[in-house]
Image (spheres, grey):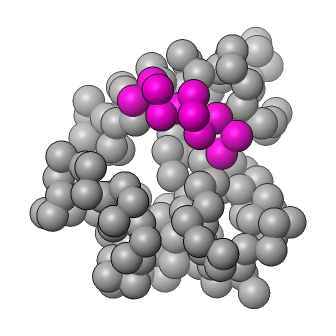
């Protein structure tokens, strides 16, 4: 089941993101940031009631939002959960009137299958100055930027 994240989910989301960050497949997010951006997040809850995936829709500007913090536990991968999480964020963006979504990711092929196209990171100066400047990899970002226009 895909649902909005709650306060009770934050510690599990943090652990999941931390584990993926340790593998180098995603950038870490501090616990404090997860609490302050909780309303950005959706989760996949498995049959046992465990949070097994998450994804965020973070509004950047009037016409632009970011898909971020997409993670699915290894034991739940290859079942379309990541796709469903992203599709949930896309539906929310549409309902808000936001029709351009981007992702900074190492998973280019996954996002490509969802219709995202590779673009230059310089297209997102708001993102760079709001978030990227705080990243330990700045200014040597090794993630790819992908854009989805759903207008």
Most frequent secondary structure within the magenta stretch = helix
Q: Is residue 108 visible?
A: no
- Residue 13 drawn at (x, y percent): 54, 26
Compared with residue 96, is residue 146 higher up or lower down, i.e. above or below?
Answer: below
Question: Percent position (x, y) of residue 32?
Answer: 46, 26
Question: Residue placed farthest to the right in the image?
Answer: 95
Please say whether residue 39 is one of the residues in the magenta stretch.
Answer: yes
Considering depth in this image, is 93 or 60 the residue closer to the camera? 60
| Residue 78 in which image quadrant | top right
Can residue 93 be seen from the camera position used here?
A: yes
Q: Is residue 61 above or below residue 66?
A: below
Check the picture and name the quadrant holding the N terminus: top right
Q: Quadrant of residue 76?
A: top right
The verdict on residue 106 being magenta is: no
Residue depicted at x 13% and y 63%: 140
> In the image, which residues are magenta?
30-40
Q: How many marks?
A: 0
Residue depicted at 55% across the width and 65% down the height: 60
- Check the image and name the residue furthest to the left: 140
Q: Is residue 103 left or right of residue 53?
A: left
Of residue 44 and residue 103, the one placed in the foreground of this image is 103
Q: Tell me the quarter of the image containing the C terminus.
A: bottom right
Residue 98 placement, left or right of 77:
right
Q: Is residue 37 left or right of residue 74?
A: right
**Residue 53 position (above or below residue 145):** above
The residue shown at (36%, 25%) is 19
Where's residue 123, x and y in %?
40, 84
């Amino acid at each position: 089941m895909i649902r909005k994240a709650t306060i009770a989910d934050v510690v599990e989301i943090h652990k999941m993101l931390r584990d993926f960050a340790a593998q180098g497949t995603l950038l870490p997010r501090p616990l404090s940031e997860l609490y302050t951006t909780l309303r950005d997040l959706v989760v996949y809850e498995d049959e046992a009631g465990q949070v097994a995936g998450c994804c965020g829709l973070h509004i950047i500007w009037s016409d632009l939002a970011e898909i971020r913090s997409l993670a699915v536990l290894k034991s739940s991968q290859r079942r379309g959960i990541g796709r469903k999480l992203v599709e949930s964020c896309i539906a929310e963006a549409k309902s808000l009137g936001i029709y351009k979504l981007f992702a900074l990711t190492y998973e280019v092929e996954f996002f490509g299958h969802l219709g995202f196209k590779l673009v230059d990171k310089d297209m997102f100066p708001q993102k760079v100055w709001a978030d990227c400047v705080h990243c330990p990899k700045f200014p040597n970002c090794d993630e790819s930027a992908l854009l989805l226009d759903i207008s």
